[in-house]
Image (cartoon, rainbow, N blue to C red):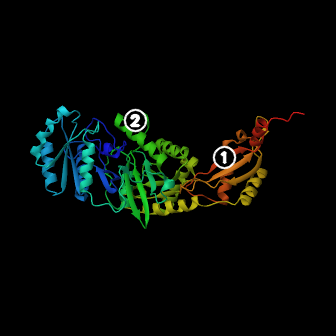
Amino acid sequence: MFNRIAGRRIAIVHAQPGITRDRISAKYEIGGKTFRLWDTGGIVGAGETQLTKEVRASAELAMAKSDLILFVVDGQDGVNPMDRELARLIRKLHKLVLLLVNKIDDPKHEPRADEFSALGFENVFPISAAHGRGVPELLKKIENFLPAADLKPQTSLRAVGSTSRSANLAHPIAVAILGRPNAGKSSLINALLRDRRAIVSEIPGTTRDAVDIEYEREGKRYLFIDTAGIRARSKHSSSIEVFSVMRGEKTIKRADICVLVIDAAEGIKAQDRRIAALIQNARKACVIVLNKWDLVRTIRKQRETMEDAIANARTELFFIDYAPVLVTSALTGEHADRIFKMIERIRRAARAHIGTGKLNRALRAAFAANPPPMVKGKRLKLFYATQSSGNESREFAPPEIVLFVNSPRLLTQPFARFLEAKIRELEPYPGLPILLTCRARLDRHSERSRRIPSRKR
C-alpha cells in the first residue's frame, strides 16, 4: 500500500511475514497539500521474537505522532484475532482511522469487506494495493482530512523532493550509512539524531529496507539512509537479504556522501574492503567510521590506541585513502557529532579550485622529476592541464582535472595515483576522489581535417 501511494517501489515486498521492521517514511503532495506517509512493521505476531518488541514500539510511536491512521487488513483471510487486538490498540489512541481491506482484487470480492465492519470503524475502503483498485477514492478521502493548502493547488500526487537537484538547490545532503551486518549502522544514526528512529538489534540483518530519515541541524538539512548490512553474496540467507543488499548498493549511487561504518572491535574484513571498493568505483565522497570504540579503548595510552586503529584502517583501505577516518562509539555517542563537522569540511573542499597556472607548474615539475613509464615504446606527454568547473548542482561533486596529452592510453594507473598525490599537495580535497580525465590534444584537429574536403585546383 505504501508503494502504491508513493508510485514507486520504496518498501521491500515479500510473502514472508515480518519483512518491514524500521519505520519508512516519504513526503507527498496531493491537491497542493503536503502530508507524510509512514510504513511500519507488522505490530503483532510477525518477525523474529527478539525484534517484536522493538518493531511494535516503533510502529506505536509512528501512530502516536500521526494525525490519520491507515489500518490495513487482509481481505482474503477475513477478520482474525490479531486484527481485533490491533483494532483495540488503535481505538485507544483516539485518532482518525481509515480501515483498508486489502486484496479485494475483483468487484465480486467486495462483500468480503463487510465482515470487517465488526472492528467498529466508520470509514471502510475495499482496495487492492497490487492492482490499484479503490486507491483514487482513498487518496480523495485523505485529501479531505488535510488542512487547507498554503500554496497554489496542484492536481497531481507526487513525492516532494523528487525533482532534480538542479531545480532544488535546497535539497538535503544525502548521507548513506554503509557497512557489514551488525557494524552499528542503525545505532550510529540513532546517536546522530539522538532518537531511536532505526531499530537496533544484535541480530545481523535487522535492517532490510533502505530507510530514509530526514533531519535538520543548525539550519542544514540531511537525509540519512540506513541500509541493510552488505555481506558477501554467497552468505546471503534468503532472497529477501539479496534484495536488501542490492538496495544498499543502489543507495551508494544516489548518495552525496557515503559513511562506511566498520566494527573496530573485529577489525577490517574482506567485505569492508569490498564495500569501500563500491564507494570508490562510484566516485563518491566518503568518510570511514571506526565504530564500537568503547570496546577497543584502553585505560592507558588511549590516544596511541586510536592512532594505531586509524593507521591500520588507512593501510587496509589504501585505495580509498582520500577518505578521512573517524573513531566513534554509537553506543555512548562519543565523537559521533564529528561526522557533521567532517561533512561540512568535505562540502567546503568540493568548492575549492586550483588555478590553471599553479596546476600546470606543479604537474610539469612532477613529469620532469618522475617521467611516466614507456608504454609500447611511447611515453605520455602533458601539453596542458586545467580543473573543470564541475557540476554546480552537486555540492559534493569530486574535482575533475582535465589533462591534454598526446595519447590517453599512455596514462598508467600507478602514474595516475602519483599525479593525484601531487594534486593533493596543492589542494587536499579531504573526503573527495579526484577525477583525472585525459584528452588527446590533436583529436579535435584531426577530426576537423577529415571533415573538411580538400580544394580542387
Which residue is most to the right?
457
Which residue is most to the bottom?
218
Residue 293, above or below 219: above
Which residue is most to the left?
118
Label 1: which secondary element: strand
- Front one among 327 and 136: 136
Circle number at residue 437: 1
In percent of width and height, residue 57 lies at 23, 53
Q: Does residue 436 appear in this view?
A: yes
The amino acid at mark 1 is: Thr
- Whether residue 431 sits left or right of residue 262 in the image: it is right
In percent of width and height, residue 182 lies at 37, 47
Q: CA distance from mark 1 to mark 2?
A: 38 Å
Of the image marks 1 and 2, the number of the one nearer the N terminus: 2
In percent of width and height, residue 363 lies at 73, 54
- Front one among 221 and 427: 221
- Mark 1: give few (<14), some (14-19) or many (20+) Cα within 10 Å: some
The amino acid at mark 2 is: Lys
- Whether residue 121 sits left or right of residue 161 in the image: it is left
Residue at image position (61%, 61%) is 352
- Quarter of the image containing the C terminus? top right
- Quarter of the image containing the N terminus? top left
Is there CB contact under 8 Å for labels 1 and 2?
A: no
Image quarter of residue 299: bottom left
Q: Nearer the viewer, mark 1 or mark 2?
A: 1
Q: Which residue is mark 2?
A: 235
Residue at image position (24%, 41%) is 134
Image quarter of residue 357: bottom right
Label 2: which secondary element: helix
- Whether residue 375 sits left or right of residue 291 in the image: it is right
- Whether residue 352 sits left or right of residue 341 in the image: it is right
- Front one among 131 and 200: 131
